Image (spheres, grey):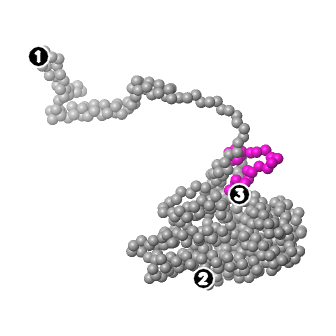
């Protein structure tokens, strides 16, 4: 094979200067010469890409000198006495760890910091923080706070042009509801109230002036709070209070607002009875009930759940509240209620549940693992005077330790004697006919 032709042309100047190499025009090149030129260009390009972009030595030296000047010696670690880590950090660690547990991944987990997405009203943001920090607890309190906040949102709402309030208001309320749910799972009472509010909004008269329509919706919210919560509690007070006789020993668990009103009303009417308050972690709500009843002059006994067996034989009636009641008669209430009801049934003690009808749910739940919520873990790390203080975050970081606090449990209807509502005393098996009947009357 003949050698490839030279692609450069040697030019010899006449003044004695060294010869220069000029590139040969591609038009004058042969096909083989053009191919060789392309191969050279590709090789040069590949070499350029493969070569690392080295920093000049002087620049490296300058950076190294600056790093040496700014570096400070790290002090040696000093063993400090054990300090109490903020419970917020421990709670966050527990939440992240619980999210990794497959069996509890569907539980409602506390979310201390919820990012507002969309146009969220300041009242809703403040309420969401109170929910996530458990500043507002209890089904009735959360429902009233939610509806009151919605009244403020409705009054500050303005209908956009070319739309109607009945069609656009729910679009405005949906992000507010989602923000509350993101802070803490929605209670059954809140869900029932929001469904009723949606029904009222969809039925608003489109010919009504905007301010009149908003005033009408706020008035209906007030009527809902008055009829379904406040007046219902008053009827339950009279009905359940009439069952308390002189000399009775009433046992209650944790703290229910309606049970508290029943006991105070019965004491006001002059009945002589005593109350046994059974409590447990993590909420320890019975302490608040104890202070209220003892301040009113009611004789009280306070004990924790493990000591229930020592006093159950002295009890006349067990009176508890409920977070919600499902259509199959099961009672969804504070964790520990099921144990109290089963122990009472074992000793033939009647168990009476005080519950408003707006807490009834058309769903069915067979156990407390189907749907539940995790309580904050802060109170689990409180130290008693004679115990060694413990670091909450250190306990959380143990690989073989998992801390879970389900907030509710499920009591089967077989352990419930009766349910006291504003429509009367009914057996738990008759719950399924109540919600639909009341829904038509609203």
Magenta highlight on residue 390? yes
**In this view, 375 is above or below 273:** above
Disc 3 is placed on an element classified as: loop
Compared across the picture, whether 44 is left or right of 269 comes to: left
- The image quarter containing residue 324 is bottom right
Decide whether the magenta segment is chiefly helix, strand or loop. Answer: loop
Q: Which mark is residue 405?
A: 3
User: Distance between the Cα atoms at labels 2 and 3?
Assistant: 37 Å
The magenta-colored residue range is 376-398
Q: Residue under circle 2? A: 442
Q: Is residue 41 above or below residue 114?
A: above
- Mark 1 lies on a secondary structure that is loop
Q: Residues within 10 Å of mark 2 (few under 14, many from 20)?
A: few
Counting other residues with Cα less than 10 Å from the Cα at mark 1, is it few (<14), some (14-19), or many (20 or more)? few
Q: Residue at x 49, y 28 (%)?
A: 67
Q: Are marks 2 and 3 in contact (CB under 8 Å)?
A: no
In this view, 425 is above or below 252: below
Q: Nearer the viewer, residue 161 or 97?
A: 161
Q: Is label 2 or label 3 in front? A: 2
In the image as oriented, which residue stretches furthest toward the left?
A: 14
- Residue 341: percent from left, percent from top: 80, 69
Q: CA distance from mark 1 to mark 3?
A: 99 Å
Point out which mark residue 15 bears: 1
Nearer to us of marks 1 and 2 is 2
């Amino acid at each position: 094979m003949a050698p490839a032709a030279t692609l450069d042309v040697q030019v010899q100047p006449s003044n004695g200067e060294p010869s220069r190499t000029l590139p040969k025009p591609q038009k004058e090149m042969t096909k083989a010469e053009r191919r060789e030129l392309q191969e050279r260009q590709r090789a040069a390009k590949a070499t350029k890409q493969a070569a690392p972009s080295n920093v000049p030595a002087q620049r490296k030296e300058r950076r190294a000198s600056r790093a040496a000047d700014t570096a400070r010696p790290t002090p040696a670690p000093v063993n400090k006495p054990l300090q109490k880590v903020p419970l917020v950090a421990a709670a966050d660690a527990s939440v992240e760890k619980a999210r990794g547990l497959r069996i509890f991944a569907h539980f409602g987990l506390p979310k201390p910091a919820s990012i507002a997405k969309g146009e969220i009203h300041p009242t809703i943001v403040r309420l969401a923080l109170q929910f996530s920090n458990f500043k507002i607890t209890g089904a009735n309190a959360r429902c009233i706070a939610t509806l009151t906040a919605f009244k403020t949102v409705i009054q500050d709402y303005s209908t956009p042009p070319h739309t109607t309030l009945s069609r656009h208001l729910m679009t405005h309320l949906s992000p507010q509801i989602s923000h509350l749910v993101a802070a803490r799972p929605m209670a059954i009472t809140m869900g029932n109230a929001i469904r009723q509010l949606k029904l009222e909004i969809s039925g608003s008269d489109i010919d009504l002036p905007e301010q009149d329509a908003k005033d009408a919706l706020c008035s209906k919210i007030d009527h809902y709070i008055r009829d379904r919560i406040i007046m219902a509690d008053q009827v339950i007070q009279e009905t359940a209070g009439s069952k308390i006789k002189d000399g009775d020993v009433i046992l209650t668990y944790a703290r229910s607002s309606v049970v508290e009103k029943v006991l105070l009303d019965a004491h006001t009417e002059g009945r002589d009875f005593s109350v046994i308050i059974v409590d447990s972690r993590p909420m320890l709500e019975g302490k608040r009930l104890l202070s209220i009843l003892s301040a009113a002059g009611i004789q009280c006994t306070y004990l924790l759940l493990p000591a229930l067996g020592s006093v159950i034989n002295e009890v006349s009636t067990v009176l508890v509240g409920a977070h919600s009641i499902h259509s199959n008669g099961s009672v969804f209430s504070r964790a520990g209620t099921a144990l109290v009801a089963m122990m009472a049934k074992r000793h033939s003690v009647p168990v009476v549940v005080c519950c408003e009808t707006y807490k009834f749910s058309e769903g069915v739940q067979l156990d407390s693992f189907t749907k539940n919520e995790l309580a904050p873990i802060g109170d689990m790390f409180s130290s008693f005077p004679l115990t060694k203080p413990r670091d909450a975050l250190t306990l959380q970081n143990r690989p073989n330790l998992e801390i879970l606090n389900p907030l509710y449990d499920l009591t089967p209807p077989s352990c419930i004697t009766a349910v006291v509502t504003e429509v009367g005393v009914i057996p738990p098996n008759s719950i399924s006919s109540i919600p639909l009947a009341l829904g038509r009357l609203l």
